[in-house]
Amino acid sequence: MQATSCPALFAGSLMPDGSGIYVATNGDPTQLTDGQFDLRPSWSPDGSRIAFAGDLSGRAGRPSMNLYKVDVNGGELERLTEDPGVGVLQWSPRGGMIAFTRSLRSQFTDAVFVIGEDGTGERMLEEGARLVSWLANGEAVLVDSGRELWTIDVSSGARNERRNQPESFLRELPCQNGLHEIIGR
């Protein structure tokens, strides 16, 4: 069930201390996380949880981003991935899964992955591509190579080419509050 109205959600660069993820209800921000590198928050479809990329290692230097989730009413952060390099992410419109990109440093490329919202079943869908968005049916993701777009069925891994057809996939993207959510493009 899609929340009819969600509080504002933003990463800490808008706040004076520049860290963490905040939810603003009625204009009053509530801090959910306090990590210096907590980025790219994404709502669960029911509005009760947030997934985000973060580095909670405490090491100095380049951030080592993993996928985390947290309940918006408080609670412990839960780490969902073991390997760093998480980039953009988005919760499936039906819940149950999160799609994300990861930098494959050994190949100097990005890849699209999915994982269960409980942290199980992580698998790579496509190497050399970036996630753009889940389709509204929650069964496929739209991905981008920088030159072309295509969809990948999450269950089968089947690829459906979408060259030069932006109007065809825009009708299939989720719409919340009258806006299509397209990430990473």
Image (cartoon, rainbow, N blue to C red):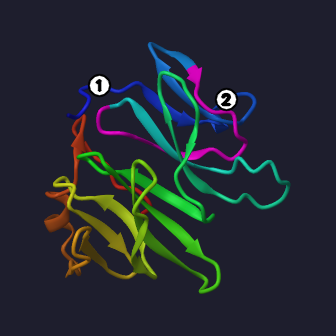
Residue 44 position within the rendered picture, expressed as x and y whole percent measured from the top left: 36, 39
In the image, what residue occupies the spot 44% across and 13% down?
26
- In front: 54, or 143? 54
Q: Splitting the image into 4 quarters, where does residue 36 fall?
A: top right
Three-letter amino acid code at the position of disc 2 = Met
Residue pushed farthest front? Answer: 120
Compared across the picture, whether 167 is left or right of 131 comes to left
What span is colored magenta in the figure? Answer: 30-46
In the image, what residue occupies the spot 44% across and 81% down?
127
Q: In what quadrant of the picture does the C terminus appear?
A: bottom left
- Residue matched to label 2: 15
- In front: 168, or 130? 130
Residue 135 position within the rendered picture, expressed as x and y whole percent measured from the top left: 22, 58
Three-letter amino acid code at the position of disc 1 = Ser
In the image, what residue occupies the spot 26% across and 68% down?
154
Up-down: is 50 above or below 121?
A: above
Residue 46 position within the rendered picture, expressed as x and y whole percent measured from the top left: 29, 33
Up-down: is 23 above or below 103?
A: above
- Residue matched to label 1: 5
Answer whether residue 143 is magenta in the image: no
Question: Tag 1, which secondary structure?
Answer: loop
Up-down: is 143 above or below 97?
A: below
